[in-house]
Amino acid sequence: MSEPRKREAHAPKAGVKIHPVVKYPEPVLARVAEPVTEFGPELEKLVEEMFESMYVAEGIGLAAPQIAIPKQIAVVDISFKSRPEDKLVLINPEIIEREGKATEEEGCLSLPDIREKVQRPEWVKVRAQNAKGEFFEIEGDDLLARAMQHEIDHLNGILFIDHLSRLKRDLVLRRIKKLQRNGEW
Ligand code: NI
C-alpha cells in the first residue's frame, strides 16, 4: 500500500537484496498466493528484504506477489520507520472478524499514481503467523485495518481497484492503458 506523501529516500541496509515491485497487469498479482509451510532463517531473510524493498519504494505495506513471489507473506509499517512497534509481518494471514465501514483514498505500489476511494470494514481482527511460524492475532482500525486488508487482498489476487464500481474501475484501466501507450507505465 502507498500514501500520497513523498518520503525521504531510504538507504537500504548493506547486503540486503532489494526486489523491484511488479506492476499491474503482471499475472502474479492476480493469483492466489501459496501458503508458507517452511519457517526459519530463510524466511526471515526474505521478510527483511521485503521491508527494505518496501521502504525503498516508499510504501507502508508490501505483499510477496508484488515482488513476484507467489507466497502468503506480507509486511506492513504504517508509520514508515517512525515507530519500531509498527513493523508487522503477516504470514498465512486470515481476517477472522470485521466491523463497521470506512471510506478512504488508497494507493498501491503496483498501481503507481492511481489513488481512489475504497470502502472497507473499519476494524478487523487478523490471525497470522510470524516468520518463526508462531500464530498470533492482531486487531486494528483506521490505517492499520486498511493496510492489513489491502495486503491480505494481494495474497488473494485482489487489487484495490477490484473494489471500485465497474464504471470507476473501467476509467482507471483506461487511464493505465493510455499511460502504457505513452511508455509511462
Ligand atoms: Ni498494494
Image (cartoon, grey):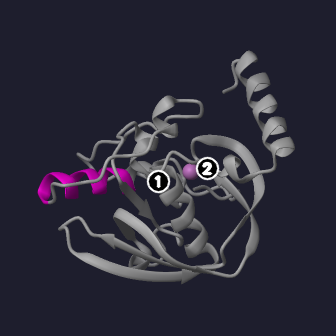
State the predominant SS element of the stretch in magenta: helix
Instruction: Give the residue drawn at x 51%, y 67%.
Output: 148
Residue 99: % across, % down: 63, 82
Residue type, label 1: Leu
- Asked if disc 1 is less than 8 Å from ligand 1, the answer is yes
* Badge 1 vs badge 2, beta-carbon distance below 8 Å: no
The image quadrant that residue 134 belongs to is bottom left
Q: Local crowd at mark 1 within 10 Å, few (<14), some, or many (≥20)?
A: many
Alpha-carbon span between mark 1 and mark 2: 9 Å
Element at badge 1? Answer: strand
Residue type, label 2: Cys
**Camera-side residue of 91 and 97:** 97
Magenta residues span 40-51
Compared with 78, 165 (above or below) is above
- Residue 62 numbered tag: 1
Element at badge 2? Answer: strand
Residue 4: % across, % down: 70, 56
- Asked if disc 2 is less than 8 Å from ligand 1, the answer is yes
Compared with 136, 53 (above or below) is above
- Residue 42 numbered tag: none
**Camera-side residue of 101 and 115:** 101
Label 2 sits on residue: 108
Based on the picture, tell me whether residue 62 belongs to the magenta stretch: no
Instruction: Give the residue drawn at x 47%, y 68%.
Output: 77
Q: Give the quarter of the figure containing the N terminus.
A: bottom right
